[in-house]
Amino acid sequence: MRIMYGEGFSCEETEGYRIRIFNNMIHGLKDILDSFPDFSTALSPENQPNADLLATARDIEYFVSFPAYLCEPLRKLWKDPACETWRKRNNDALKCACL
């Protein structure tokens, strides 16, 4: 609504949302990787270094750029067959929970 009526967001609000989105991406993918044993799946061996790098990622702070070195590892991890399996099985579980 704020955008529709031309008020927009303050610099601090925009920065807060940017940080929240970044941190949700990092922590969400970490949680997915941590849940693989529950789904009897495992990360591809070639992606293990990317998972190790993600494990060391820290939250960003105000006015600090997204770490460019994480872009490609995040992309590769998300495309890993184990993540695809997790997404399908997670969606199936959510469908069952809603019935």
Image: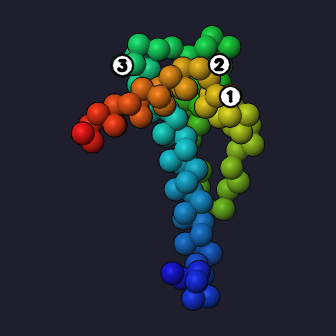
Above or below, comparing residue 8 to residue 52 in the picture: below
Give the label on residue 59, or none. none
- Tag 2 and tag 1, C-beta contact below 8 Å: yes
Q: CA distance from mark 2 to mark 1?
A: 7 Å
Q: CA distance from mark 1 to mark 3?
A: 21 Å
Give the label on residue 47, or none. 2
Q: Check disc 2 and report its element: helix, strand or loop.
A: helix
Identify which amino acid the numbered label 1 is placed on: Lys
Quarter placement of the C terminus: top left
Q: Residue at x 55, y 72 (%)?
A: 13
Q: Residue at x 27, y 42 (%)?
A: 98
Left/right of residue 53 with respect to residue 28 in the rendered view: right
Q: Residues within 10 Å of mark 2 (few under 14, many from 20)?
A: some
- Dot 2 or dot 3: first in sequence order is 3
Which is nearer the eye, 24 or 3? 3
Picture quarter containing residue 69?
top right
Which is nearer the eye, 28 or 19? 28
Q: Check disc 3 and report its element: helix, strand or loop.
A: helix
Q: How far from the left and from the top, in percent, is residue 65?
A: 71, 54
On the image, numbered disc 3 is attached to which residue?
A: 38
On the image, numbered disc 1 is attached to which residue?
A: 76
Q: Residue at x 41, y 13 (%)?
A: 40
